Image (tube, rainbow, N blue to C red):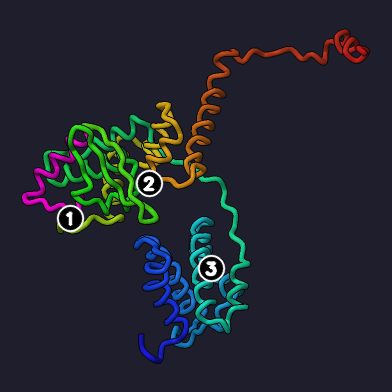
Amino acid sequence: MTVNSTDFAQLVTGFLTEYLPLQRNYSRNTVLSYKDALKLFAVFLTEFKNIRLNDFSMKDFDRQLIVEYLEWLRNRGAGISTANQRLAAIKTFADYAGIQCIEYLAPLQSVQGIKTKKAAAREITYLSVEQMSELINLPDINSDSGLRHRVVLTLLYDSGCRVQELCDLMLRDINTGTQPTVRLHGKGDKYRTVTISSNTATLVAEYMKRQRNTPLKDQPLITNRGKRKMTRDGVNYIIQKYVSVIRKTDTTFPEKIHAHGFRHSKAMHMLAAGINIVYIRDFLGHEDISTTMIYSRADNRLKNEAINKLAPKVTDETAFPDWTKDQDLLSFLNSFK
């Protein structure tokens, strides 16, 4: 940072490189999320407000500007939850800036008064057991790329991991022994160990044997063609590749399936199998069980839909007579004391 940089630029640098990772001990992924919010804010300033970053200082950072930023995000297609996440990052930055630049405390505090918008209840999208099985077993394990793709799809589902957790897996995190497990590095820099099936363990062990001549424990488990760590975009590309293949012969198969849909599917299948919601919470790595309850609510909705579909078959949709035409009965009921 040069001596001619603005106080805004200096605060952003300190916020991302010192405050969040060192003082707040935030994980790398969380810091990157905050960086994205501030990067978009910089784009908003330069492209929408026509303000050069070298001319922008903290005295211009106020409530009205952030409200405009949020509106700009929504006009670009950001959903309510995404805009709320960006606002949370901006508020945290404003807190930090208020401590560092006490002279701007009043306008910075006004940013905290911006309310988040209430998002509609999240719709859980997931595949049935049969659909998931078809998708996972599609890659040809006789080819190197097919085997790698099968491992990606299988681990995503069987471990219920987040896509970044899959990308971050190292060889040392895999146990393919008699009680196979995967150690996942999740949100908040927390680790959890989950059980995987023996079939998944056998698949992963074969992948490691065939593609790793001299495996080192600190190497990433999943790599791309260039032998570099797999990215989130790379994982979603693999998923969509095989979804497209299935849809060529089955147009009823869901068109848009993302990595998180595997996690949703695993949770819903566990719930349908009668597994306790508390165990599902721990398996998914949720801090609060209220987050896991979205699957229970979705499951209840499905049960209600199934009951309503079944009801006409049970009641035979009998045409009941109009009781109001029975004047004797109506008179009796009206006169009954």
Q: Nearer the viewer, mark 1 or mark 2?
A: 1
Q: In the rendered structure, does residue 201 fall within the stretch colored magenta?
A: yes
Quarter of the image for residue 304 reads top right
Q: What residue sits right under mark 3 in the picture?
A: 91
> In the rendered structure, are the residues bearing label 2 and label 3 in contact, judged by CB atoms less than 8 Å apart?
no
Image check: 255 left or right of 168?
A: right
Q: Position of residue 87 (x, y in %)?
A: 53, 65
Judge by depth and name the residue closer to the eye, 312 or 122.
122
Q: Residue at x 53, y 82 (%)?
A: 101
| Neighbour tally class for label 3: few under 14, some 14-19, many 20 plus, Cα within 10 Å | many
Image check: 314 left or right of 226?
A: right
Q: What residue sits right under mark 1 in the picture?
A: 218
Q: Name the kind of residue labelled 1 in the image.
A: Asp
| Neighbour tally class for label 2: few under 14, some 14-19, many 20 plus, Cα within 10 Å | some
Residue 260, which numbered label?
A: 2
Q: Which residues are magenta?
A: 199-223
Q: Quadrant of the C terminus?
A: top right
- Ranked by sequence position, the earlier of labels 1 and 2 is 1
Indicate the secondary structure of the residue bearing disc 1: loop
Q: Name the kind of residue labelled 3 in the image.
A: Lys
Q: Nearer the viewer, mark 2 or mark 3?
A: 3
Quarter of the image for residue 177 reads top left
Q: CA distance from mark 1 to mark 3?
A: 37 Å
Quarter of the image for residue 336 reads top right
